[in-house]
Amino acid sequence: MNIFTYILPTVLHSTRLLPQLSRVLEHPLIGEVILINNSGRTLELQHDKLQQYVSTEPLYCNGSWNYGVLNASNENIILATDDIEYDTSVFDFVSQIDLKPIGPLMYNSSNSTEHDFLDIQPITPDRYIQLHGSGQIMFMHRDNFLKIPDEIKHWYGDALQLHWNIANNRMPHFIIGKFVLTTNLSERDRKSVV
């Protein structure tokens, strides 16, 4: 079974952050959580697995992922955003997969179903144009992560990982089946949590 480093950029605005982070921290397959705090304020949460980096200059999402991967102590990483909720039992499923040969394992809302199974499916060239929410959570081996250029602050970090891995003969996959991820980017969900 794989142990993961969970890499989480935040600006401390999502009401989903603390409940989901608490579930992640309690999961036995999470070896550490690297929280990159771009708000300039400290999150008042203590846990043995939690490493919090409070940036004085915002690293944004992609820079935060770069920082987390560089500082991860585990070979397998999870890149996530702070505005999502999901059942952490997906870690049990993913931990059984050798991530190194396949590139990133991504979420895609169009592959979520209520069927009681989990599986993976290759992202073929005819399908990768239909990525819906893939950058909200990605599982991968650290060696399969391409440092995102500093000029790219918010967008395209997930697509860059996808295209770079395909170019290097690793076929990224979607998680299919009962992996439902909830997010809400509306104003009512974007309240400060500190």
Image (cartoon, helix red, strand yellow):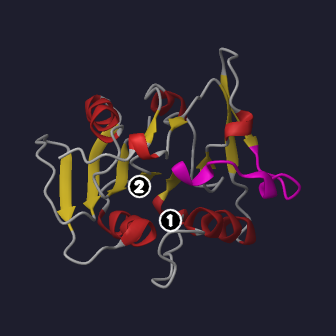
Query: Alpha-carbon neighbours of circle 2 within 10 Å: few (<14), some, or many (≥20)?
Result: some
Residue at numbered disc 1: 143
Relative height, residue 15 to residue 165 (above, below): above
Q: Does the magenta stretch include residue 194?
A: no
Quick check: can you spot residue 51? Answer: yes
Q: Is residue 92 left or right of residue 46?
A: right
Kind of element beneath mark 1? helix
For image coordinates 60% across by 69% down, the residue present is: 156
Quick check: can you spot residue 137? Answer: no
Q: In this view, does 156 lie to the left or right of 7?
A: right
Amino acid at pointer 2: Glu
Which of 13 and 66 lies nearest the eye of the viewer?
A: 13
For image coordinates 11% across by 46% down, the residue present is: 44
Residue at numbered disc 2: 75
Amino acid at pointer 1: Asp
Inter-mark Cα distance, 1 to 2 = 8 Å
